[in-house]
Amino acid sequence: MWVVEVITNEEEILKGLAEAVIKGNEEKSTELAQEALKMRIDPYDAIMNGCSKGMNVVSDLYEKKEMFVPEILLSADAMYAALDILRPHLKVDTTVKKPAKIVIGVAQGDIHDIGKNLVKMMLDVAGFEIVDLGRDIAPEAYIEKANEANADIVAISALMTTSMMNIEPVIKGIKDKNLKAKVVVGGAPISSEFAEEIGADGYADDAVSAVRLVKKLMGG
């Protein structure tokens, strides 16, 4: 008798999504994302407790030099394939009364934008207006765009100890120009202590915390 493996519970789906992302298996991540919707698993949980957990493992392996750029790109493709399926089914948060304008980007000297993209997506779903500058962004560009867009928040991520040193000039420039924007930071080498040291208005260690932090800063 042939035995067919059937994934029947939420825990297995979430674990499978994480593993598919880690292994860079786009076909599997797509299949599991579709299965998650069929099983009525909350798309938010599928993203945060499946895809995001997998990318956290990938980031750790990269930091330990146990994973390299080609593999990371495959993992990113697998994650984005799942996100494309799950994202349209996310419930838009209607608790944000006045959409805040958020300028987001990756610090100068850093091209690692997976974490930034996940934070951007969750902020978007939460109802905020997002201006994505991209990666490897010079301090002057953040300051200029914050001024031009009359931004409420400037969010900067960094995944390297060298690039995180390029965040403080952004904070200084915003204060020197008396802009209203508050600066929030995140990324693997950054801590709440470092954020406080450079004068940031807040620190978040994942996408969920980032949304919560921004809401708090906006009085939500």
Image (cartoon, grey):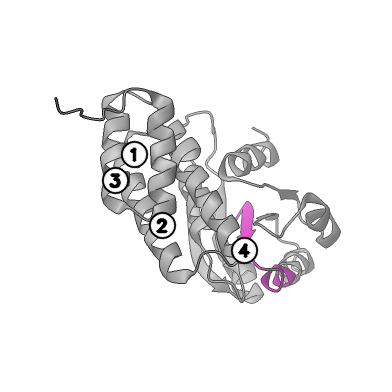
Q: Nearer the viewer, residue 120 or 18?
A: 18
Whether 85 is among the magenta residues is no
Q: Residues within 10 Å of mark 3 (few under 14, many from 20)?
A: some
Q: Is residue 139 above or below residue 191?
A: below
> In x, y percent, where is residue 202?
73, 48
Q: Nearer the viewer, residue 81 or 132?
A: 81
Q: Is residue 114 above or below residue 54?
A: below
> In x, y percent, where is residue 113?
51, 62
Work out whether residue 126 can be spotted: no
Q: Is residue 25 above or below residue 165?
A: above
> In x, y percent, where is residue 2?
15, 28
Q: Please identify the quadrant where the N terminus is shown.
A: top left
Instruction: Give the distance between the C-alpha atoms of the residues marked 2 and 3, in whole angstroms.
Output: 11 Å
Helix, strand or loop at disc 2? helix
Residue on which the image places disc 1: 86
Residue on which the image places disc 4: 63
- The mark nearer the N terminus, 1 or 3, is 3
**Residue 152 - label:** none
Residue on which the image places disc 3: 28
For residue 165, which quarter of the picture?
A: bottom right
Q: Residues within 10 Å of mark 4 (few under 14, many from 20)?
A: some
Which portion, as a residue range, is magenta?
Answer: 151-166
Look at the numbered discs 4 and 2 and tell me whether their residues touch, using CB distance below 8 Å: no
Q: Residues within 10 Å of mark 1 (few under 14, many from 20)?
A: many
Q: Nearer the viewer, mark 2 or mark 1?
A: 2
Residue on which the image places disc 2: 75
Helix, strand or loop at disc 1? helix
Kindly identify the amino acid type of the residue bearing the numbered disc 4. Answer: Glu
Instruction: Give the distance between the C-alpha atoms of the residues marked 4 and 2, in whole angstroms.
Output: 15 Å
Q: Nearer the viewer, mark 4 or mark 1?
A: 4
Residue at 37%, 56% (x, y): give it.
24
Helix, strand or loop at disc 4? helix
